[in-house]
């Protein structure tokens, strides 16, 4: 058994049985080991950013890490943007990054790079295996690190000679430390803050936004009269009919300030205190009112479900009945595209168990109310802000949940960052419907020009924000990668196409030409 095989066997034994891969020469012994080891599903991506995004989506839906297989420093660099998104979302990933043989590095050949230096900003844990004898134990340590709550990025660098040299065997993955529970003093302080009724807010993030956490939050709200609010960036919200509804904090500063207006006491559970996405001249960075007292019940790395349960018990709220969303769909919209009409089309057609991966950025900000009463579904958002997120994450979600329909919503500009995802969807026959909102521009940046004080932009500035000359043909691109699709030019056609896509298995693309 060589080092690469000892690593693959250690990964499988440790529960890491999916690998999203874009290998090169230095990773060939890992690839070869796949033929000798049962239990590892390897999914090929045509770009490393697809692999890292897919691993993010896989973790969000399974709460267990997948691995990536990346080619030296440049391959890791290509994966970095979606590793950034995964890190912000608290997704656990084990990155396996190939390296030159240790004795070869000194020759500074073309792909030589400081891989550890590239990895550190996007990883919680980084290690280079020094010998084949340590590869298995290093792999086990990477798995343990990736499982640390809420999920961490672990990057293991595998020099080629440690991969091909004889190894000693398979390693056991150590137990992962449990997240720290809140102290009794913390629970009492949070309970006291929420007893102030309508001036109090329970601000949720992370796993607090799963059905169990929302149910507990709903019980607490029923008991105290506090408002329940989700953070702006959310890794996964379980929502729909029968679940406690919650709105995300809005991206636009003025709207977010209005949502938080009057809050005197804010209790954080699985979320950081709200701050503006960017700095804007003359606008605040901190979004809570000046006189708002903020109490942390559970930090991002804590156990939000356990914390909410303890808080509900302290308040005597465990037997309260929370308010839940009624089963109600919007009417099927017709006519020209409007933002409300787009939201209604989605809400009218979402199947039960759907997984919505949302990178609609500008178009989809107001979609939530239209799907609040749709059948139970999950909604995944981009917490890191790096675009090219939705279609790779949809790949990972579909691999994780093959019996559920995945809907990826993405703008045309963002879609072009990781358009190679379509090829992987076709190759793996993944059940993903991709909605491209084609407004022929980086539309969000029009409003951002004004928000940062760049008023009255001229033709050269505007030209940097448009996606024409030539116009992108997404149905043709999809067809070339094995994904069928169609254009929708109005709401009636969109609803028709969505209805068709939801009734079929396998990938499908709808180009919403706005």
Image: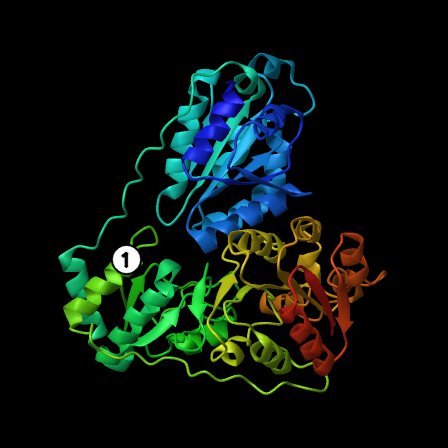
Colour mapping used in the image: rainbow
**Who's the residue at 33% across and 79% down the image?**
262
Q: Nearer the viewer, residue 347 or 366?
A: 347
The answer to which image quadrant residue 298 occupies is bottom left
Residue 20 placed where, x, y %? 58, 41
Q: Is residue 299 left or right of residue 166?
A: left
Q: Choose between 281 and 32: the one closer to the eye.
A: 32
Question: Is 332 rendered above or below residue 349?
Answer: below
Dot 1: element: strand
At x 45%, y 75%, the residue is: 240
| 192, above or below 162, in the image | below
Q: Residue at x 36, y 69 (%)?
A: 288
From the viewer's perspective, is 270 left or right of 276?
left
Q: Which residue is mark 1?
A: 298
Where residue 434 appears, x then y in whole percent? 66, 63
Residue 369: image x %, image y %?
A: 50, 80
Q: Position of residue 442 (x, y in %)?
A: 69, 63
Q: Is residue 292 visible?
A: no
Residue at x-position 38% and y-position 43%:
147
């Amino acid at each position: 058994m060589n080092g690469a095989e000892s690593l693959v066997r250690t990964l499988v034994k440790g529960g890491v049985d999916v690998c999203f891969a874009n290998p090169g020469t230095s990773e060939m012994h890992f690839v070869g080991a796949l033929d000798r080891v049962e239990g590892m599903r390897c999914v090929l991506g045509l770009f490393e950013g697809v692999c890292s995004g897919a691993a993010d989506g896989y973790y969000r839906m399974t709460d267990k890490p997948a691995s990536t297989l990346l080619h030296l420093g440049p391959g890791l660099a290509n994966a970095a943007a979606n590793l950034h998104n995964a890190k912000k979302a608290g997704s656990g990933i084990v990155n396996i990054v190939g390296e030159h043989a240790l004795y070869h590095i000194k020759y500074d050949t073309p792909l030589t790079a400081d891989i550890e230096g590239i990895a550190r900003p996007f990883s919680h844990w980084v290690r280079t295996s020094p010998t084949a004898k340590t590869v298995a134990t290093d792999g086990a340590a990477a798995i343990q690190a990736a499982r640390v709550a809420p999920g961490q990025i672990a990057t293991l660098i595998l020099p080629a000679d440690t991969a091909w040299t004889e190894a000693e065997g398979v390693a056991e993955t150590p137990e992962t430390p449990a997240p720290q529970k809140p102290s009794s003093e913390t629970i009492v302080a949070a309970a006291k803050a929420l007893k102030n009724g309508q001036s109090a807010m329970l601000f949720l993030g992370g796993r607090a936004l799963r059905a169990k956490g929302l149910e507990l939050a709903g019980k607490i709200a029923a008991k105290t009269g506090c408002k329940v609010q989700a953070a702006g960036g959310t890794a996964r919200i379980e929502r729909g009919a029968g679940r406690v509804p919650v709105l995300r904090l809005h991206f636009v500063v003025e709207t977010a300030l209005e949502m938080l207006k009057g809050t005197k006491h804010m209790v954080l559970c699985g979320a950081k205190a709200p701050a503006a996405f960017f700095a804007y001249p003359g606008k605040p960075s901190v979004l809570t009112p000046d006189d708002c007292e903020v109490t942390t019940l559970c930090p991002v790395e804590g156990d939000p479900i356990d914390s909410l349960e303890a808080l509900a018990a302290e308040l005597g709220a465990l037997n309260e009945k929370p308010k839940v969303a009624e089963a109600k769909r919007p009417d099927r919209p017709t006519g020209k595209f409007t933002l409300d009409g787009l939201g209604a089309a989605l809400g009218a057609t979402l199947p039960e168990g759907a997984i919505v991966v949302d990178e609609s950025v500008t178009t989809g900000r107001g979609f939530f109310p239209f799907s609040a009463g749709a059948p139970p579904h999950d909604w995944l958002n981009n917490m890191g802000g790096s675009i090219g997120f939705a279609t790779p994450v949809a790949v990972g979600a579909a691999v994780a949940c093959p019996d559920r329909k995945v809907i990826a919503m993405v703008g045309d500009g963002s879609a072009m960052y990781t358009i190679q995802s379509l090829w992987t969807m076709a190759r793996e026959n993944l059940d993903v419907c991709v909605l491209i909102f084609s407004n022929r521009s980086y539309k969000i940046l029009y409003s951002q020009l004004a928000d940062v004080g760049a008023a009255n932009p001229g033709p050269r500035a505007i030209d940097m924000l448009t996606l024409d000359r030539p116009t992108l043909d997404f149905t043709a691109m999809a067809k070339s990668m094995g994904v069928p699709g169609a254009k929708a030019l109005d709401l009636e056609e969109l609803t028709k196409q969505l209805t068709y896509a939801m009734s079929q298995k396998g990938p499908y693309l709808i180009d919403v030409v706005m």
